[in-house]
Image (tube, rainbow, N blue to C red):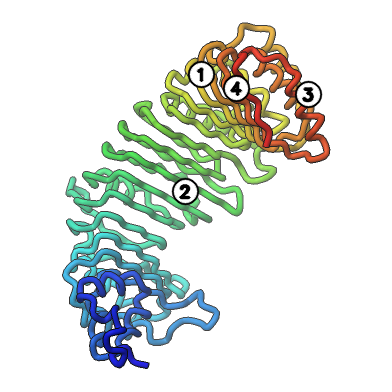
Amino acid sequence: MALGKLGKKDIISRLSDDVLSHILSRLQTKDAVRTCVLSSRWRNLWTLIYNFYFDDGEDDPFGRDPNFEKFVDGVLSVCQSKDIHNFYLDCTMINDNEISHVVPWISFAVEHNVRNLNLKVDIDRVGVWLVRLPQSLLTCSSLVELTMLSDCILDIPESSVVCFPSLKIFFMRISSPDGNLMKKLFRNCPVLEDISLHGSNLKNKDELTFDINVPTLKMFRIWLGMDYYVSKHKFVITARDLECLHIKDYTSSNFVVNDSPFLDVATLDVHEMPGAIDEMDELEVNRAMELLRGINCTKSLSLTAYTLEFLSLAIKDNMPTFPNLIDLELGIKASFGWKLLPHFLASSPNLESLTLEMNHGKECALQVFLRFESKSVPSCLRSHLKVIEITDMRGMCGELEVIKYLLKNSEVLEKLEVNLASSMKKKYLRRQILNYYRGSPTCEIKFI
């Protein structure tokens, strides 16, 4: 039944055009267009939408939409919105005629003051050129967030011309990186605060240097993945006001952080592909330690077991001091993790929270840790450490000895939380841990 025949019961149709345009803008564009058949009241309402989601269905089980270009052209030709909030384009172009549509679509979004632009334009032809983005995109004063999920060509002048004057959030997926392009891009974005880079199966075999010099940058995330052992790249990060840094690197690339920014959060997952770590030379394993030095002023630090594996090969009484570190999370891989724990405790005088995530493998010897116990107790245990959390504990000798040591020497500890992975040993482990001496009389032990 058409909505117009419902009379007084048709409450939705009685809403204003502004309200209905807000509702329709939250639908997929195809669904918004379909509402035109509901009644004469709805015939042209969809032309007021300010969010556009165009997906050619390449990944759809029913196949790509053969009328995709006509649909996009038709929708944009009757658009009445002067300001576009979100413009999402996901398509695979298979011939020159289809490729020619892309730039006008992007230009349309720019001309209509787009705020959030999300582009994924793949070319389904070997050796064909990449899509060259319109120059008007560089000077778009309304654009706040830009996502590029495919390689494109962007011509940035050599001179110091301001690019993306209002851009604050930038996400880029790369497979054919251009270090010079990134250098010019990042240096000329005056208010950029958040950068995310995602690289997988990088096709450039040359060792490139990416200079990420952004004074306004607050958040930087990077994920690098490889299917095989290839040339590594160098990333130089210069951002004095950086607050959050997240690095996930499967290539042991070279990361340099300048100016020792006062980070709130730093997360490192740095490792090689399985088996490749045995082939690492001294220069490569030292990269992780140098990266650690560059972020030593962070308040919160999270290191995976793989990262500690790298660091354990580079440690030579050269651990940096972490004067601001309050929250530390370490992945413990049996053959490497305990080797570094004493160093981190000794280098973190103000540590308040410690999380140990067990990554089980071969159980390690306790010689390094037990030798540490005979030395002076780290100052953080005596005066600052309040919370300890241990996850996936299985009751191995190493785990129990570490818990025993921490309970004994943590004089202001308020809570020890232990996640027990072994159901068969839970009663025994609880009893064993509860019987350990506690240096803090107010410490509460909780089992999960």
* Residue beneath the point at 19% across and 64% down: 113
Q: In this rendered view, identify the residue nearer to me: 436 or 9.
A: 9
* Mark 2 surroundings within 10 Å by alpha-carbon count, few (fewer than 14), some (14 through 19), many (20 or more): few
* Mark 4 surroundings within 10 Å by alpha-carbon count, few (fewer than 14), some (14 through 19), many (20 or more): some
Cα distance between the residues tagged 1 and 4: 16 Å
Q: Nearer the viewer, mark 1 or mark 4?
A: 1
Q: Secondary structure at mark 3?
A: helix
Q: Quadrant of residue 343?
A: top right
Q: Return the residue at label 3.
A: 432
The label on residue 348 is 1
Q: Nearer the viewer, mark 1 or mark 3?
A: 3
In the rendered image, residue 58, in percent from the top left (x then y), is placed at: 48, 76
Q: Return the residue at label 4.
A: 315
The relative height of residue 285 versus residue 373 in the rendered view (above or below) is: below
Which amino acid type is shown beneath numbered disc 3? Gln
Which amino acid type is shown beneath numbered disc 1? Ser
Cα distance between the residues tagged 3 and 2: 56 Å
